[in-house]
Each structure stands twice: as structure tokens, then as C-alpha cells.
Amino acid sequence: MKSFRWTLNMNTRERVAFVNITSKVEEVLRQSGIREGLCLVNAMHITASVFINDDEPGLHEDYAAWLERLAPFDAGAERYHHNRTGEENGDAHLKRQVMGREVVVAVTEGALDFGPWEQIFYGEFDGRRVKRVLVKIIGE
């Protein structure tokens, strides 16, 4: 069994953003040479997420609005106890928890084995700085 590790650097201009990283992950898979196995993709930061869904702009707007209703941005220390530490991103930690840390995709015949419309996204909830996404592929 082989393993291959790669990190993608992400840096969004916006505080909250959804970035389709499918083509980047597919390129890493090609570089790995692995034809059968599993591909783990995970956000290496606690205010970012990796998830699978449809690449449809209206859905992304819905996610942003829904997450903002669940955990509205508030830099103060009243709403989020986390902000009492001097941080201003208590909401981003909660948004990440809802959207998840990672995805695992089967690799079949050298390709990501997706269902219809599935794509891999990086979700950013406290952006405007460099963060990393780990791609770890294991198999033959």
C-alpha cells in the first residue's frame, strides 16, 4: 500500500467563502499515482471546513445565510465566550463545527468516485489569511 500527502494553501479575500477545490484534489490524485484507495481531504484549521455538495451558487448563498443565522458574526465578548480570550472569531468555530472538518472519497480506477453533482469544497469562516488543506491518499 502506498500513501501520498499534499497540502493546499488557501487564502480568501472574504471572511466567509466557499471554494471548489475538486480540480486541485484531482490533480493531487494524478500526482500520487494511486489508482484504488481512499482520499482524505481536511481543513487543518479550526475555523475552516471541507465538505461535499453541489457547485450551485444559490446553494452557497443559502449556506452563508443559514450559517449566519445559526452563528452570527459578533466581535464582542457578550455573545461568544471564546471572544473573551481576545479573539473575534467565536462564530467561525461554530460554523466549522456544523459544516465539518473533512471528507473521504473513494478512489476507483484513478479517479474520485463521486455521485452525481458531488464536488469538494473548502469552507472559510474567518478568512483573509493563509490556511492549509491536507490531501492524504492511501491505496495501490
Image (spheres, grey):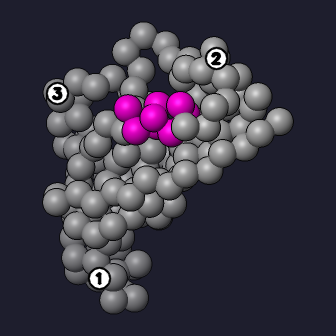
Task: Count the labels in the image.
Answer: 3
Q: Position of residue 47 (x, y in %)?
A: 40, 62
Secondary structure of the residue carrying tag 2 is strand
Residue 1 vs 107, above or below: the answer is below
Identify which amino acid the numbered label 2 is placed on.
Answer: Thr
Q: Is residue 127 above or below residue 26?
A: below
Q: Quadrant of the N terminus?
A: top right
Depth check, front residue: 50 or 71: 50
Disc 3 vs disc 1: which is toward the camera? 3
Q: Which residues are magenta?
A: 23-30
Where's residue 101, x and y in %? 52, 50
- Residue, disc 3: 58
At 23% from the left and 28% from the top, the residue drawn is: 59
Badge number at residue 77: 1
The x, y position of residue 65, in whole percent, is 19, 43
The image quarter in which residue 33 lies = top right
Mark linked to residue 108: 2
Looking at the rendered structure, the secondary structure element under dot 1 is loop
